Image (cartoon, helix red, strand yellow):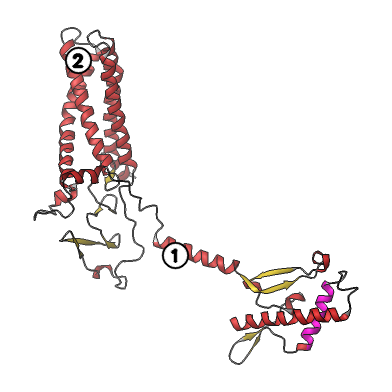
Amino acid sequence: MCKKLSQLLPAGVAWFLLVGSTAFFYALLAPRMIQDDMWGYPAYCVVGIDIVLFLLVVSNLVMAMCLDPGIYPIATVSEEQNGGDEFRSPLYKNVVINGISVRMKWCVTCKFYRPPRASHCSVCNRCIDNFDHHCPWVHNCVGWRNYRYFFFFLVFLSLHMIYVFTTCAVYLAHTFHQKPMDPPFLTSIVLLILTTVLAIPVVGLTIFHVVLVVRGRSTNEQVTGKFQSGFNPFTRGWMDNCFFALCHSQTPSFVGYPSTRTKKKMQQRNKRTLKVLVTDETSVLYVPDGDGKEGGHIRLKQMRQGDSDSVGTALSLGRREEKSTTANGSTCNLYEDKNSTAAAYEASVAEAMQGSSLSAGSPSSERLALLNVVIPLIWCSEVTDAVSR
């Protein structure tokens, strides 16, 4: 917990300086500028422009802090087939990009070879796509998905600081001999000193990143000297580099995709569900109750796979026939005595058809014809089920 609080401290200081200094400017200095006859109506334009710059700074800072920089999920299965011994995996693999060999380093933590321009962040403990650096003031890594927001944050913050510095300097020049000790005057002095001290590193960092964007490099590549030999295989020319880094379409996050372990669990759960829900199309259940006697029709109920182990006469009579095992281990649910089977079916059908048009007034020949049709169908279904097993 202490480590997390210490990591939040730089970001909290950055927000305090940004929001606090801007609030003092709007609360004390901006109203005096509007009321002063020297400024007049242009004072509204001056304050309005600074409000727009402040909103751009805050919006880009929030996006840089909250957006996923391009975190690669940890692999649940190692990329190298070495029996689980990660230390025996090759340390590097080489790929050719634009005719130049680029090394992909094996990541022991994430268990895969890092793609080109990716690097492992020691603070986040994850591999980041197109890793630039980990910024403590933003409290997030700067990578492929949030780099342009970080870049625009630096640009608009530099413009905001230069604008406030210029406004305070002009105000001090015109009110130095009039009211040297009033609150707006003191506020302008404090803001002038604060923006002077903070603008030096901020503006310098902005210029540094402008150079990196034009050259098509990242902070990590520049600091580690990956392209000291000369040609950068990722450069596209200064104009295309700027467009590719700042105006590209947003790529989807890797975090939103389920991991390999999650996919396997979902597949196993779906298989279990299918086993329960799959029905046996060759097995039917005769239900001789009162609901199925209307119009002389017999109600049929389709059975699940697990309930169709014993079919035919056993289910129609309300009991399960025990499986007979042969010498080779196969099972069969068929009756050995066909006469007893026919008698059982005849009794079952007669019971189900009581009160119907076919039971009372129909001749026995029609009943026998019906049984001659039903019994072969049931035998076929039983044979099919036995062969499938």
Is residue 127 toward the left or the right of residue 384 in the image?
Answer: left
The residue drawn where x is 76% and y is 75% is 316
Dot 2 falls on a residue whose secondary structure is helix
Q: Crowdedness of circle 2 by 10 Å Cα count: few (<14), some, many (20+)?
A: some
Q: Nearer the viewer, residue 215 or 144?
A: 215
* Position of 262 relative to 249 (above/below): below
Name the residue type under label 1.
Answer: Lys
Name the residue type under label 2.
Answer: Tyr
Residue 194: give x, y in percent of width and height.
Answer: 19, 26
Quarter of the image where one finds residue 328: bottom right
Residue 311 in view (yes/no) = yes
Residue 307: give x, y in percent of width and height.
Answer: 66, 72
Residue that label 1 marks = 264
Residue 134 in view (yes/no) = no
Is residue 181 toward the left or the right of residue 319 in the image?
Answer: left
The residue drawn where x is 69% and y is 85% is 334
* Position of 129 relative to 194 (above/below): below
First in residue order: circle 1 vs circle 2: 2
Residue 264: give x, y in percent of width and height.
Answer: 44, 64
Q: Furthest residue to the left?
A: 229
Dot 1 falls on a residue whose secondary structure is helix
Q: Which of 327 and 43 is in front in this view?
A: 43
The residues colored magenta run: 339-352
Quarter of the image where one finds residue 351: bottom right
Is residue 9 toward the left or the right of residue 374 in the image?
Answer: left
* Position of 125 relative to 246 (above/below): below
Task: Determine if the magenta segment contains residue 342.
Answer: yes
Quadrant of the snapshot with the C terminus = bottom right
Is residue 214 toward the left or the right of residue 75 in the image?
Answer: left
Check residue 171 in the rendering and tell me which mark sits there, or answer none: 2
